[in-house]
Amino acid sequence: MPERVDRDGTPAYRVLGVEVTRREAAFLVLGVVFLFVIPDIASLSNSLQLSVIHQGLLFGFAAVGLNLLLRHTKLTSFGHAAFFGTGAYATAVLARYAGVQSVGLLLLGAIAAATVMAAIIGVLSLRHTGLYFALLTLAFGQLLYAIALGQSALGGSDGLPVRPGPANQPLLFGTAFSPDVYQILTYYLTVVVILIGLFVMYRITQSPFRNALDAIGQERTRARFIGLPVRRYVWAAFVISGIYGGVAGGLFAVVRQYVRPEGTLFFLRSGDILFMAILGGFRTLVGPLIGGVVLVFLQDVGQDVTQYYEFLTGVVLLILVYGFPRGIVGSLRSGGIVNTRLSELRREPSVLSAWGRSAAQSIERKVTEALTSLRIILFGVD
């Protein structure tokens, strides 16, 4: 039975250790229902493809893991595709060379491989922080990409097919299905895994472990002074984030039935995962998941509409970033930038004139820089 509690003066209920208000519970139920009816919506829509939403959820789930580092330890990883790719290739190798057909065993293999990889990279990278840590994670990610690219056993640049069943009848839980049915069933499997993963991440972020990570992220020296084993805690967070990437990669391999280095291990994939967390709102639990769906959807739509899809996607993303400075989910909670500015204006009307002065100064500065650049180009002098 739900336990009634008080949260900052607001009535809330505790269910399975999760405290939610009535409003949050309503949004939670609507979100879960929406996830399960997406295949029906996609079947009725010409513009919405289930495969696009599915891929966005998978990469968004990897971003949920990265968000643990980004939000609480203030560490930025540029190589998180290493764990996504490790999980994907572990699944492909087990299915192709070991003949494993059980999805559960394949995912366990992906988790084990990603855990080992994250543990090793964490030990070697977490000796440093800031830019050096980011560059080290990028270097390790590219090292794994080069290994996958150069190993014939892993398919090289062509990649590795995952065929636990016939090509036209992939297996799921020991049963062969048509490709369309297989896509829907693996989507529901992904949704179930994501919901479990979100619940686990919520429990982590409500535990004393999260408080220790916050203390470390705010001031490492002070955290050491009060006796926290800083490196051990950060290493544990790094491994957990890598596990989420490995699970996402394993599901990706099961769903796509094919694994390529460019799609799983390349450094641009790490950039996508990082940007998904920021775009959706790295201060929220589900923000990275929303960011993953939005980014993949924009990339897909832009690719279909114009050959300049990267430029178009960039423009739309700039609008989203400036319009939702706390990420999509975080800004929606506070009403977005428009409501924030209106609130400032209501509190202090002189803010409007300050905005005007700031805009005028910015324009003047840009014009001066442009004229200076033009003089240098034409006359070679400043």
Image (spheres, rainbow, N blue to C red):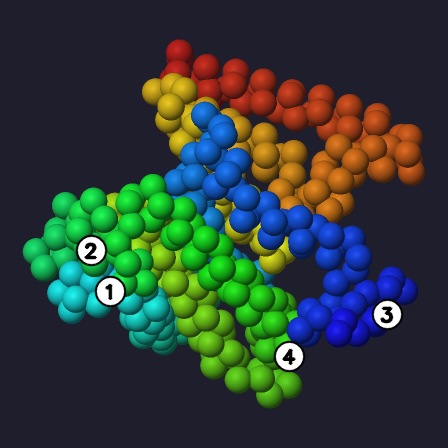
Q: Which of the two discs, 3 and 1, labels the residue nearer the N terminus?
A: 3
Q: Residue furthest top?
A: 378
Determine the CA span between mark 3 and mark 4.
20 Å
Q: Which mark is residue 142?
A: none
Callout in the foreground (3, 1): 1
From the image, tell me which residue sits under label 1: 101
Element assignment for label 1: loop
Amino acid marked by disc 2: Gly
Determine the CA span between mark 3 and mark 1.
48 Å
From the image, tell me which residue sits under label 3: 6
From the image, tell me which residue sits under label 2: 165
Density class for disc 1 (Cα within 10 Å; few <14, some 14-19, many ≥20) is many
Determine the CA span between mark 2 and mark 1.
8 Å
Pick the quarter of the image with the N terminus: bottom right
Callout in the foreground (3, 4): 3
Nearest the camera: 107 or 281?
107
Q: Position of residue 75 (x, y in %)?
A: 50, 62
